[in-house]
């Protein structure tokens, strides 16, 4: 192995012989709504790394957001919006904030949900929460991709 190819990592700097690369803090501040972290049994705290310095953890969080945008909550990327019990719990605790987020982001979002008269409240809670999570993911990914340019 070429000795010049080795180095040590110290904090946010990578030090190599005769070379130092400093990672810069992300310019995009990503706010993760409280209702995105409300899922039972899952830990979505890793999403806080989206605002951090470039790192493997930040890249993993960005890939998770991309996968969520591509497959939606129904793909299993965000089960708290798909599982009726968890969706009902989240909407009971944070429903007003979820609705406010959708109104601020989309405006009149109800026609986009394609609900019918015979849908259950559990289904409606899941649909609304999924719409909010997916909208947050699209908005977040768009902001992060603008920063990369």
Image (cartoon, rainbow, N blue to C red):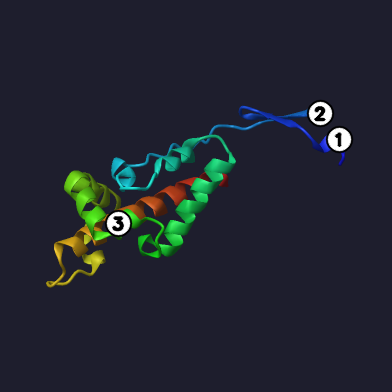
Q: Residue at x 20, y 54 (%)?
A: 88
Relative to 88, residue 115 above or below? below
Lateral position of residue 42 relative to residue 146, left or right = left
Indicate the quadrant where residue 121 lies: bottom left
Residue 108 location, x and y as percent? 21, 58
Q: Badge 3, how many Cα within 10 Å: few under 14, some, many 20+?
A: many
Q: Residue furthest left?
A: 117
Q: Are marks 1 and 2 in contact (CB under 8 Å)?
A: yes
Q: Quick one: label 1 or label 2, which is nearer the N terminus?
A: 1
The secondary element bearing badge 3 is classed as helix
Relative to 101, residue 7 above or below? above
Residue 95 location, x and y as percent? 19, 48
User: Label 3, on which residue?
Assistant: 81
Q: Quick one: label 3 or label 2, which is nearer the N terminus?
A: 2
User: Label 2, on which residue?
Assistant: 17
Q: Badge 1, how many Cα within 10 Å: few under 14, some, many 20+?
A: few
Numbered badge on residue 15: none
The secondary element bearing badge 1 is classed as helix
Cα separation, mark 3 vs mark 2, equals 49 Å
User: Label 1, on which residue?
Assistant: 3
Cα separation, mark 1 vs mark 3, equals 50 Å
Let me know if residue 6 appears in the view.
yes
The N terminus - image quarter = top right
The secondary element bearing badge 2 is classed as loop
Let me know if residue 107 appears in the view.
no
Q: Residue at x 30, y 60 (%)?
A: 82
Q: Quick one: label 1 or label 3, which is nearer the N terminus?
A: 1
Foreground: disc 3 or disc 2 = 3
Residue 7 location, x and y as percent? 76, 32
């Amino acid at each position: 192995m070429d000795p010049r190819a080795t180095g040590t990592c110290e904090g946010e700097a990578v030090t190599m012989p005769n070379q130092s690369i400093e990672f810069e803090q992300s310019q995009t501040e990503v706010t993760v709504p409280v209702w995105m972290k409300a899922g039972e049994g899952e830990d979505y705290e890793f999403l806080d790394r989206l605002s951090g310095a470039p790192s493997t953890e930040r890249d993993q969080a960005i890939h998770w957001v991309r996968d969520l945008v591509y497959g939606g909550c129904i793909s299993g990327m965000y089960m708290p919006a798909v599982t009726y019990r968890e969706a009902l719990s989240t909407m009971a605790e944070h429903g007003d904030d979820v609705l406010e987020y959708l109104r601020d982001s989309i405006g009149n979002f109800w026609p986009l949900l394609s609900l019918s008269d015979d849908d259950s409240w559990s289904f409606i809670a899941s649909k609304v929460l999924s719409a909010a999570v997916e909208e947050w993911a699209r908005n977040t990914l768009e902001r992060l991709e603008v920063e990369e340019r």
